[in-house]
Amino acid sequence: MAETRSGPGWLWLPLLLCGAFLYVPIAVLVAMSFNDGGSAYSWDGFSLRWYGELAGDERLRSALATSLGVAAGATVVATVLGTLLAVGLARHNRSKLLEAGAMAPAILPDLLLAIGLLGFYYAIDFPKSALTVLVAHAAFGTAFVVAVVRARLAGMDLSEEEASRDLGAGAVTTFFRITVPAIAPAIVAGALLVFTLSLDEFVIAYFTAGPTTQTLPIAIYSMVRAGITPEINALATVLVVVSIAVVVFAARTVRTTEDS
Amino acid sequence: MTTDTWLPDVAAPPRTLLDVVDVSRRFGDVAALDSVSLTIAENEFFALLGPSGCGKTTLLRSIAGFEQPDSGAILLGGEDLLGMPPNRRPVNLMFQSYALFPHMTVERNIAYGLEREGLPGVQVRRRVGEVLETVGLPELAKRRPKQLSGGQRQRVALARAIVKRPRLLLLDEPLSALDRKVRGDMQLELKRLQHEVGITFVVVTHDQDEAISMADRIAVMAQGRVQQIATPLDLYRRPANLFVADFIGTSNVLGGRLEGGSFHSDELGALPTAGATGPAGPAHLVVRPEHVRLLPEPDGAVRGEVVDVQFKGGSSHVVVGVAGLARPFLVSVSGETTVRRGQPVSLDWSTAVVVADELV
């Protein structure tokens, strides 16, 4: 139980400043999405017109669809590969180097990974498209899933798996009936992490996307170059709402898995 | 009365169930098991007793299949176990941490092993119900491990292991996670269960009281080797070496030499040693506190002065300081004692054991 303690009274001030620093930009962005005028800076009255324009914008809609497709695909690939890799590392590996190697893509600068992948696609003469972005995102996403799932495995009682073997289960049954339920919260967390990282990833997508492929960040970037319109604010507001919904959903899923 | 015609079954020698032959296992430079051999009979309650790091858990895990010995053989009813993976061995292990599956209810936990055998659901449910009755927890079937007390978890772990009707049940420190009061009850409970289900039990423990009060026979281990295998009474009365004498029960130990059938203490000279046997040379004299007689007159074997008197309920412990000895002598007297602190006394005994110096 959290113990409530009253510290010196003035401490609310830095707290407030921190909060303001974090959330005022987002609040301004949300507020301006309801601006009737065409300026992103001055208020001309309340309106939903930019949401209407957003809904009618064919280019943004298709970019959103591309991004969701790439994120979903990368999440599935990264979650499956990352989970298997984490189990392998935790149960059958003593090399620190291999372990570091598995997590390195999460730490390496995106630019490095982007250039490397670009060179790789050229080398094998693979045409760039949304698929190449998906593969690139799955590559660094796998590293994030490994990091999250590996931490959970480290805290798991190894004798549960041994007990399953002792009671007559083979290695595969033990994995699906005992190991997976035990690390399920970490798998869910890893998957969500990959999904959100992929959705707003710009650098790697920019390098590996085909000439006509536009993910959402790339589409927004090209729009912003022509000046910020409240339409982008409206899009950002939608993304904020979706992100919060996903995080809340994830937190609830993890909690119910742990209670059960 | 002519008895020999209708008693042949009782006299028949017990059938060997488990044969451990010359098993060794090294971890780097450390020999966890060093040529360990032992046999365990059908329906026996057997204990592996020793301090932590003596190899007892490694032996248990080798029987279960979670360690592979470097050399030697382990046979169950004459069949080689070492070639089988753990899930094929007709042996079950109750883990020290219990290792209950946290995401399953009590009944799902217990049913898990039976489902792996491919038994039909009706039979699984019936046997789970029966075993829950046996361990006395039928009302907790729908609970999850988190919602159980330590003692209840222990019973569930036991139920999960015995429901498979293994030929051999291995128990790794089964009582160590329980508090003192529950532990005494569970000792009785385990013995009752063993008789009821008729399964051979092998218990690993570091607690000599636990081993002595539960086991039919005990193997005392130290530094990867079996020091002695005997009944609890024999271990107490005839320890094979100083390690066993010290580990089992309380004792007064004197260093010295055995020469011509009598013991000469380094500090006190010749001492009474009824029936001491063994080769001449360095040895230790082991005298149990309850075998020492306290005499008011100075005509015993050893003279000293009472340092402390401790009333222990059914008995009293008299601590006697003896000139020349670093450790005082411990004497156990039943009931009350009339001696007082500072009183000069002398000690004598008719039962003592002379043991060799070293470990096996």
Image (tube, grey):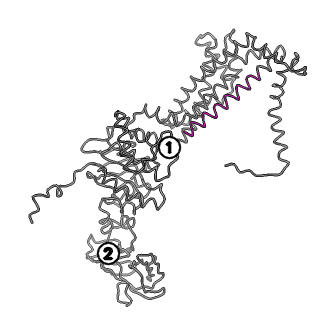
- Residue holding disc 2: B352
Image mark 1: chain = B
In the rendered structure, does residue B351 fall within the stretch colored magenta? no
Q: Secondary structure at mark 1?
A: loop
Image mark for residue B144 = 1
Q: Secondary structure at mark 2?
A: loop
Q: Is residue A243 visible?
A: yes
Which residue appears farthest toward the bottom when viewing the image?
A: B297
Residue range (magenta): A236-260
B199 vs B227, nearest the viewer: B199
Q: Marks 1/2: CA distance? A: 54 Å
Amino acid carrying label 2: it is Ala
In the rendered structure, does residue A242 fall within the stretch colored magenta? yes
Give the answer, above or below, for where A109 lies relative to B108. above
Identify the residue shown where x is 34% and y is 73%: B285
Q: How far from the left and from the top, in percent, is residue A248? A: 67, 32
